[in-house]
């Protein structure tokens, strides 16, 4: 049985990519041709992959409190390497650079 | 060793999940778990180290380094250096024996770059792991993963490099083995040694204080570095750079991240230093070759990812 595939769209741009349930947002992006999110430590510690989720459901693995404060977490900010999408997502582009 | 500081003694690293961290530091790196304490800290070491432990892992909500300690020849040295550090203008905190399990008293201070350092002279010596001190075998059987031999050094990022240079060389008796200098002749990288090694601690100039670039562990050969790189891929561990050679120190290296985002290095070989050697200098405009001797391209992640 194949896993569910989610579509991740970057707001206000043409960019999007797909990933499978169980893959983190950043890992999914790295496998695709999209380079919208910066890749750092991939462990929730350095803050380079900080994004804002505008739409969609997701879980997060532990993230450094230095980079995601409690109120930011509640506002939809997260480190992409620790985000596990549970639906299609739309991400805000302000928090990362296009390369 | 000029003023009685022998070698890196231990480093305390913050991790966000202790279970995941132990799989990394024990199963992948090959450090050995030596003890735990009632605060939840885990004590580890490389097999060739004679003291009981050199790496302390503590669970916290953000990764990074809490402190790095150097071992001194005796308690009198610790006292003398503590006074010299006070005379230099820094506050020195005394921590009692037993504050860290099976470690004697430590004196703690904050360097000009904001990093916390310690000096101590006494720690339980359990001997090299897995080999006797009498007619020892070549290596112990039962080592895991990369089979790291010892905790070797830390590279730390901070602002006041000149302040650190003065503290480490004039007060603590370290030598400047290698450096990176900008076009105005100012240091932007310092590689300091208390021994024959190319570095026991190193600093790179960075706007923020108290940032952790990596903790480094020693392997014995270039083949061991390749094998370590294979293990990094086998375990889906995030790779940073390498395997490759550094211009600075000439060491062969590979960098990767622990599950909390702390950067680790395993490396081998490279230059050695005696007190009469002048410092080796790399120009900041040639930083690409200084860090990546083959590629010569500056890698943004290597320069910016810190915990």
Image (spheres, rainbow, N blue to C red):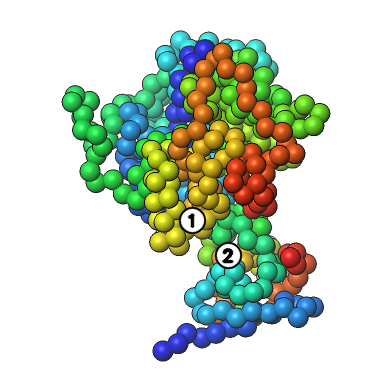
Q: Position of residue B109 (x, y in %)?
A: 59, 25
Name the disc covering residue B157, or none: none
> Helix, strand, or loop for circle 2?
helix
> Disc 1 sits on a residue from what chain?
B
Residue at horizontal 72%, vertical 33%?
Answer: B283
Residue at 57%, 72% in the rendered image: A31
Instruction: Looking at the picture, tell me which residue is in the foreground, B201 or B209.
Output: B201
Tag 2 residue: A81
Locate residue B77, reporting x and y percent. Answer: 48, 12
Residue A44 horizontal side relative to residue B24, left or right: right
Q: Have a look at marks 1 and 2 and say if they share a chain.
A: no
Q: Are marks 1 and 2 in contact (CB under 8 Å)?
A: no
Q: Which residue is mark 1?
A: B259
Q: Is residue A8 above or below residue B302?
A: below
Q: Please state if A8 lies on the left or on the right of B201 as rendered.
A: right
Query: Would you place residue B57 above or below residue B50 in this image?
Result: below
């Amino acid at each position: 049985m194949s896993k569910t595939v989610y579509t991740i769209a970057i707001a206000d741009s043409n960019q999007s990519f797909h990933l499978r349930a169980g893959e983190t947002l950043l890992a999914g992006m790295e496998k695709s041709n999209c380079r919208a999110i910066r890749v750092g430590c991939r462990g929730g510690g350095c803050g380079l992959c900080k994004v804002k989720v505008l739409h969609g459901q997701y879980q997060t693995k532990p993230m450094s409190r230095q980079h995601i404060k409690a109120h930011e977490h509640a506002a939809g900010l997260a480190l992409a390497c620790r985000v596990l999408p549970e639906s299609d997502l739309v991400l805000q582009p302000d928090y990362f650079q296009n390369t | 060793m000029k003023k009685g500081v022998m070698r890196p003694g231990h480093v305390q690293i913050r991790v966000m999940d202790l279970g995941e961290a132990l799989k990394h530091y024990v199963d992948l790196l090959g450090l050995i778990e030596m003890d735990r304490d009632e605060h939840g800290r885990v004590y580890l070491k490389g097999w060739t180290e004679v003291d009981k432990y050199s790496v302390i892992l503590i669970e916290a909500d953000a990764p990074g380094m809490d402190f790095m300690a150097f071992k001194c020849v005796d308690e009198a040295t610790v006292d003398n250096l503590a006074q010299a550090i006070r005379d230099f203008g820094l506050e020195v905190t005394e921590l009692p024996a037993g504050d860290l399990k099976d470690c004697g008293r430590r004196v703690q201070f904050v360097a000009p770059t904001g990093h916390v350092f310690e000096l101590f002279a006494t720690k339980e010596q359990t001997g090299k792991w897995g080999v006797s001190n009498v007619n020892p075998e070549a290596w112990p059987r039962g080592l895991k993963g990369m089979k790291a031999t010892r905790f070797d050094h830390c590279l730390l990022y901070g602002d006041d490099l000149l302040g650190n240079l003065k503290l480490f060389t004039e007060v603590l008796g370290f030598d400047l083995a290698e450096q990176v200098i900008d076009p105005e002749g100012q240091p932007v990288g310092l590689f300091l040694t208390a021994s024959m090694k190319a570095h026991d601690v190193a600093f790179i100039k960075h706007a923020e204080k108290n940032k952790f670039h990596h903790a480094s562990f020693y392997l014995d050969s270039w083949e061991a570095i390749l094998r370590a790189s294979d293990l990094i891929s086998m375990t889906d561990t995030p790779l940073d750079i390498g395997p490759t050679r550094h211009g600075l120190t000439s060491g062969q290296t590979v960098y990767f991240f622990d599950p909390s985002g702390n950067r680790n290095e395993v490396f081998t070989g490279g230059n050695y230093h005696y007190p009469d050697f002048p410092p080796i200098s790399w120009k900041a405009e040639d930083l690409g070759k200084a860090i990546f001797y083959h590629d010569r391209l500056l890698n943004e992640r290597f320069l910016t990812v810190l915990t």
